[in-house]
Image (cartoon, grey):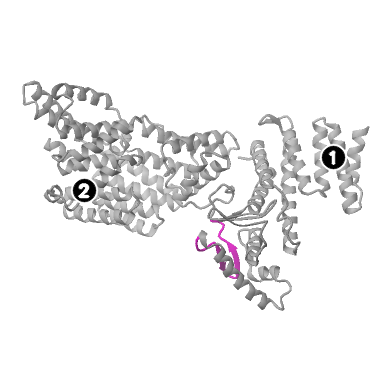
Amino acid sequence: MAALREAIRTEDPAGEAIAEAAWASAVQAADGGAPRTAQPEAAWAICGLALLSRCEEFADPTGYERWVERRDWLERSVGETGSPVIHFWRCAAELAFRFVTGKTDAAQLDQMVEALKRAGTVDAEDWIRAARVTLGHMNLQQVLGAVDHLSMLVGSSRQYAQCHPAEQSKWQYVAGYSRYFVQDFEGARRLWQIAAELAESAHFGSLVVMAKVAMARLDIEHNQMVSATRLLREVQKDLGTRTALAQVNAYHLAARIALRNDQAQEALQHLQAALAAMQWAGIPLGRWQLLHAELAQAYIALARYPEARAAVAGPGGGFTTRYGECLASLAMAMEMERDGDMGYVDALRNAVSIAQQMNLRSLLRSLPRHTAWVCARALEHDIQSSFVQSVVLTRQLLAPTDAPPQWPWRVWQRLLGGYELHCDGEILANSGKAASKPQELLKLLAVSGDNGLTADTAADALWPDAENIAAARKNLEVTLTRARKLLASAGEGMLLMADGRVRFDAQFCGSDAALLQRLCDQAEAMANRFGQSGASAARLVDLARRMAGIYRGELLPGEADTPWLLAARQSLRNGYLRASLAVAGVLMRNPDAVLGGASSAEHAAALLEIAIEREPLAEQGYLTLMQCYMQLGRQAEAMHTYRRCRDALSIRLGIKPSAAMDALKARLVA
């Protein structure tokens, strides 16, 4: 038993073999007539410790059947009503294996909590081992009561005071995680710092590394990369003299920092070094699944998607398999989307559904930009929207440029077909209320692009009748202050004034008009490079669908036709028309392709109908729509399109259709 404890304390990979020998000795002693209350109890503890060490770091549950066999033997030896120690270890090991095999149930968790309360004879190290396996699995929120019980004992109990400093450091390290899981991050950091200091005094190098790695990971989660990098440098000192597990922790931390700094190739090198250290030390490569998850993320960042899937395709069960399946599906979705395959939506739905079932908000935790892309696409396709929004808010993800209206924007303006100002989820203004000058400024900035406007341009647009530009600038400063107060519930920094320009922070503020313009630009560019990677007909149809869904009406209808608003309306119409014509041209060149149950030409016709509805004086739109209907053999609709064009041009502009339109008409009546 002592040898087993020492092997586990020093993270010795030989611990499992020692446990096997101790088990055999316990069985032999029990079969030889040893006291029934002594040897089986020791055997339970040995079995529990061995199995908990195997479960740690999401290890594969390959020993479950063997454990069940031993459990049955022990129950036959001492019966169901053993001592609290026996009950404790039975619950601990059963809980661990139920989790990693995906079979955890509430009754078993309740048993574990009760066992922790009753097992007063269990010593400090046993508490630590049980708490470590509990904390090793993020989703076991139900047992936090037991972990809190442990943290309250730290520094005050007789058991703690009798521990060696190395064991005290473990206790503090585990207690730090109990604070972390209840969002007490400062408390967690304080306990991890104490753990590091105790471990340093006890020359317990592995735990020094683990405590500093825990603090650095906390820094990474809160975007404090300077502090995380400093801790990494401390960890890397004399790394060659540390245990293999400490080296793996250090390499893993270095990889996470590199990924957060967009240095994916460097991260990959660190992870490969970690795997090499594990192999050299004889640690099974499947023991640390989080390392494989990080490896998959490095490959995703490098767009090496097949290798990302392979990194998490190893054998496993429970959490291991589900987490790996989630990452593999994300890699598949990204690869398919890159190649223009709309099947990516199904792969994305599978990945996000797994994450929701596991309550896994840390998916792609080292790749916040990629996570933001996943969340934006999931919200766009109504995939687990409530869960995805919680991921965005919990992780404080920044909005990608094409984030949809469903993104939890701090400030969102609906400008098309009416007006609404949403601030932190609340509607502050709409078309039914009289517009104020601050609201007019917000509308102007919403249609001015990510770079905003120069202060002089904004002032002149809003106060064209001012005596001079200085007076207009003064008005702008006052209005900007009032606009910031209007948006105060969304937090500071929503409206920025720097280098003589005023703009929204596009990472927190959005509008349907700005999103429409981005989608139009994207669709036009993709149509112009059709046939290249990612520019598929399916992608173009999807973009057209998104464009039509957003363009629900005129830009700020019913508002005064100020010069800046008239210019913005015309710019939006022109952009939509150009994109629609470009996409329709591609679809009409591939008329027989079937996409979503309709031919490409039918998709083109639907797109052009919306385009001429938005821009009824654009003759090129009517001309292309006539050609599309003729291609589909729908001659009557083609003639109707000609008449609509003729009437619109005659009534609004007093002109006749062009010779090209008349030539198409002649072909129809010939």
Q: Amino acid at mark 1?
A: Thr
The residue at the point 39 percent across, 40 percent down is 293
Image spot of residue 515 (x, y percent) = 63, 51
Splitting the image into 4 quarters, where does residue 275 fall? top left
Q: Residues within 10 Å of mark 2 (few under 14, many from 20)?
A: many
Q: Amino acid at mark 2?
A: Trp
Report the Cα–Cα distance between label 1 and label 2: 78 Å
The answer to whether residue 366 is left or right of residue 442 is left
Judge whether residue 313 can be spotted in this image. yes
Splitting the image into 4 quarters, where does residue 42 fall? top left
Q: Secondary structure at mark 1?
A: helix
Q: Which residues are magenta?
A: 491-508
Residue designated by label 1: 641
The answer to whether residue 28 is left or right of residue 237 is left
Which quadrant is home to the C terminus?
top right
The answer to whether residue 131 is left or right of residue 569 is left
Image spot of residue 60 (x, y percent) = 32, 31
Q: Secondary structure at mark 2?
A: helix
The answer to whether residue 450 is left or right of residue 130 is right
Answer above or below: position of 409 versus 139: below
Residue 582 or residue 193, whichever sits in front: 193
Please check the rendered image and state whether residue 492 is part of the magenta-colored stretch, yes or no: yes
The residue at the point 38 percent across, 53 percent down is 220
Residue designated by label 2: 171
